[in-house]
Amino acid sequence: MKTLTIIAALLLGNAVGAQSSSPFKPMAFLADHCWKGEVSKGQTDEHCFTWLYGGIGLRDTHVVRTPGRPDYVGETTYYYDSARKKIEFLYIENAGGVSVGSMEPEGETLVFPPTAYVNNGEAMTYRVRWTPIGEKSYEAHSEMRAAGGAWQTQFKTLLNRVD
């Protein structure tokens, strides 16, 4: 019987999505869409979100394109940690960096509390806020902890739904 349940979930795939009682409900607006924004002059950031396993996870594939440079590519897998009762994530990117963190909804805003990005033995602490603006946009605001502990904006950009 358990095998049938798993097979049914795989066959349903994205059709299930985040139910109203799902811990993913605050992130549901992102799913099954791509979002793109300009980070700096000529540099774009695009995120494409898809449900995993009938809505028990969410994948974000992300590409930063800069003219004349190789693409910076990463993937985030969001999952619900039922013991901690929160959405957590694992981020891996093509330059070798990784992050493990969490997301906490504050009203409509998705808040990613301070976490470490680690690459080549070096760590940087960052935090992020994604704030929906209407149904087809959200603002991404990323900050890093600078020397002395002050927060410094890395970027603030508007991402628009492109599909």
Image: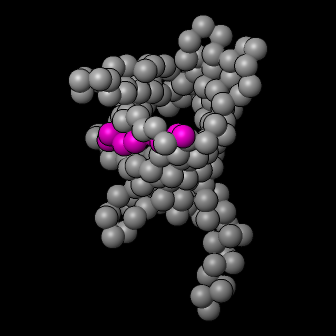
Residue drawn at x 38%, y 50% as measured from the top left: 102
Residue drawn at x 61%, y 81% as measured from the top left: 5
Asked if one can make out residue 30 in the rendered structure from this viewpoint, the answer is: no
What is the span of residues highlighted in magenta in the rendered image? 112-120
Residue drawn at x 41%, y 34% as measured from the top left: 124
Picture quadrant where residue 88 is located: bottom left
Viewer-proximal residue, 53 or 42? 42
14 w.r.t. 159: above or below: below
**Does the magenta portion include 32?**
no
Picture quadrant where residue 133 is located: top left
Viewer-proximal residue, 93 or 44? 93
| Residue 156: image location, x then y, percent | 44, 19
94 w.r.t. 154: above or below: below
162 w.r.t. 5: above or below: above
Q: Residue furthest top?
A: 41
137 w.r.t. 59: above or below: above
Using residue 108 as the reference point, say whether residue 157 is left or right of it.
right
Please, what is the dominant secondary structure of the magenta stretch?
Answer: strand
Using residue 105 as the reference point, say whether residue 75 is left or right of it.
right
| Residue 38: image location, x then y, percent | 58, 16
Using residue 135 as the reference point, say whether residue 83 is left or right of it.
left
| Residue 55: image location, x then y, percent | 55, 61
By what rule are the colours in the image chosen? Answer: one colour
Q: Residue furthest bottom?
A: 1
In the picture, which quadrant includes the N terminus? bottom right
Using residue 44 as the reference point, say whether residue 77 is left or right of it.
left
| Residue 134: image location, x then y, percent | 45, 27
Residue drawn at x 58%, y 21% as measured from the top left: 37
Asked if one can make out residue 121 in the rendered structure from this viewpoint, the answer is: yes
